[in-house]
Image (tube, rainbow, N blue to C red):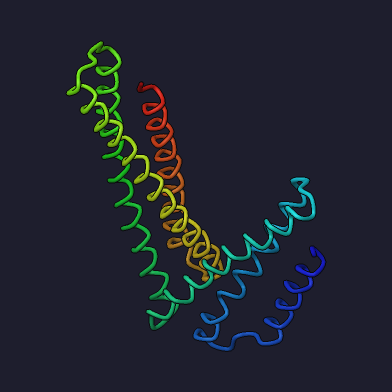
Amino acid sequence: MLKQLSLVIVTAFMLSCTNMPNSAGDLAQNEALQGGLLGGLLCGGAAKLAGLNREQIVIATAGCAGIGAIVGKQLRDRREKYASDEEFFIGEIKAAQLFNSEQAVYKERLITEVNDLRIENQEFLRSQQAGKSFRTRLARHKETINDKQQQAKTEISKMQEELKFQEALYTKLKNANSPSRLANLQNEVGKLRDIIAEVEELQLQLADLNDKLI
């Protein structure tokens, strides 16, 4: 099965090479295929190095090829909105800056919310009440924590998807001979990675708060 998948990837790659794009439009249409090929090849190699068995390698390769294809399609679709590569890079760097700025605001708000919930947790844990009103307030408190956890999970997923796109855009920008724009995008990629890590930590803190409640 692994040999079959490898053959499919190599065959597709050879076909893409024999039909190299001649224009920016053709290049945009090829993004999805190239993204899938690259994702599959890289993840397959990484899985092999990790010592996974044949079935696990096939699953990893297929999964990463799918992710690569999705990112490639995003590159193609977004590129079609612009008249030139120059406008594409400028516009998408601005979009990355706006996205990251919005997620930074979300992260700061979540920090405040987690701190407030932690204080409420301590009050509940100190209280010895067992009345109906106490149980009702505790249930609402736990529901709030669960809602924040789910929201954080959704935001993390959205940010991880955007990060893959920004990393792919960075790779394309390397060939555009624009050091200043490359540096700007590299800065944004670093920011988003940091935000994701911090929100993941906050999500763990929310789970811990929930576990400590009765």
Q: Is residue 37 left or right of residue 31?
A: right
Q: Residue furthest left?
A: 133
Report the front residue among 154 and 214: 214
Q: Residue at x 39, y 40 (%)?
A: 199
Picture coordinates of residue 67, whole percent (x, y)? 56, 63
Picture coordinates of residue 38, whole percent (x, y)? 65, 66
Q: Residue at x 30, y 31 (%)?
A: 142
Please state, as top left, top right, bottom left or bottom right, where the N terminus lies in the image: bottom right
Q: Is residue 93 left or right of residue 125?
A: right
Where is 136 relative to 106, above or below?
Answer: above
> How many labels sit on residues?
0
Where is 62 relative to 53, above or below?
Answer: below
Q: Is residue 137 left or right of residue 68?
A: left
Where is 30 relative to 131, above or below?
Answer: below
Q: Residue furthest front?
A: 132
Picture coordinates of residue 51, whole percent (x, y)? 78, 46
Q: Residue furthest right?
A: 3
Report the front residue among 22 and 149: 149
Q: Residue at x 59, y 69 (%)?
A: 35
Q: Residue at x 38, y 79 (%)?
A: 82
Where is 13 relative to 110, above or below?
Answer: below
Please state, as top left, top right, bottom left or bottom right, where the C terminus lies in the image: top left
Which quadrant holds residue 127?
A: top left
Which quadrant holds residue 139?
A: top left
